[in-house]
Image (cartoon, rainbow, N blue to C red):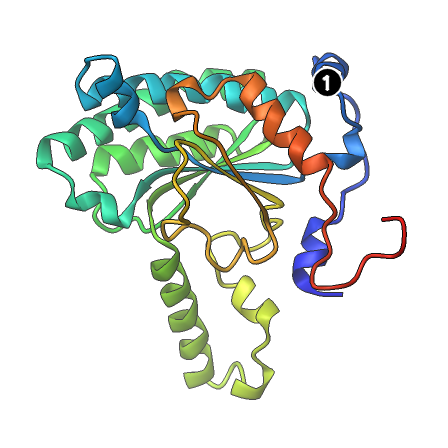
Amino acid sequence: MTASQKNSEKAPAAAAAPGFEQSLARLGVTAESLPRHVAIIMDGNGRWARAQGKPRIFGHEQGAANVRQIVTECAALRLDMLTLYAFSTENWLRSRSEVDFLMDLLLRFLAAERQTMMQNNVRFMPLGRREGLDKRVLEEVDRTQRDTAGNTGLTLALAINYGARAEITDAVRAIAEKVQRGELRPGDIEPETISAHLYTAGHPDPDLLIRTAAEMRISNFLLWQISYAELYVTDVCWPQFSVEELHKALRAYAHRTRKFGDVPAPGK
């Protein structure tokens, strides 16, 4: 059995959280058919804003506001983890005014949503490089992580200043340093070794990757971790990605057969 298969096995059912039965009934699938880890590339904020005759920053504001209902629903459904692609290493190439706005929006989001995370038993976890981020952003990130550390429900991973190639590079460097110090032999390096040095170490790989706004690309997101993830692309832009749209993705996932390179048994 591969590491990806192990990561995708369902954990033992936990005690039902408030809203679990209602959300599951509305979704119309069994708890066992839900993914443990959902990752979302939140795309289309600017495109949606332009369609409304608004500036791009309006789309970013509405996109940030939309995060709350999706996180709350994933927590109610008792998923293990939700990873959201908030700001990539490539996003620094955008105009200074847009980058500054996005950083300010992140500050406001973290400050405003900490209480919501606490109410929904959500644990916050940042993914990405700290270098390059403003001190104020890092302080809010650290405070949110610290304040929610004792929560035991959904893990909300926010990818900030994140790039999968940078993540893999950082992992390879850390492994190379261990080899150089004599703590690890090159012949002992396995896929699990690399997984253990990624930002997501200790967490399950995504079972389902959702991309909004109909873009058919991965955009340097969790390249190692999504090797066996099911892909779901919708033409709905992120500000309009509602709970019902999330349910559509989860229903599609529930009706797929995951083979992990194997041949399913007859009737599966």
Quadrant of the image occupied by residue 4 = bottom right
Q: Is residue 79 visible?
A: no
**Residue reaching furthest left?**
96
Task: Please rate how many residues cluster around mark 1, counting C-alpha atoms within 10 Å: few if below 14, some from 14 to 19, many from 20.
Answer: some
- Inspect the image, locate mark 1, and give the three-letter code of the amino acid beneath it: Phe
Tell me residue 232's x, y (percent): 54, 39
Tell me residue 190's x, y (percent): 59, 75
Tell me residue 5's x, y (percent): 71, 57
Quadrant of the image occupied by residue 262 = bottom right
In the image, 149 versus 71, the foreground residue is 71
Q: Residue at x 47, y 28 (%)?
A: 147
Q: Residue at x 20, y 39 (%)?
A: 134
In the image, 264 versus 9, the foreground residue is 264
Residue placed under numbered mark 1 in the picture: 20
Q: Secondary structure at mark 1?
A: helix
Q: Residue at x 23, y 32 (%)?
A: 136
In the image, 10 versus 154, the foreground residue is 10
Q: Is residue 246 above or below residue 253?
A: above
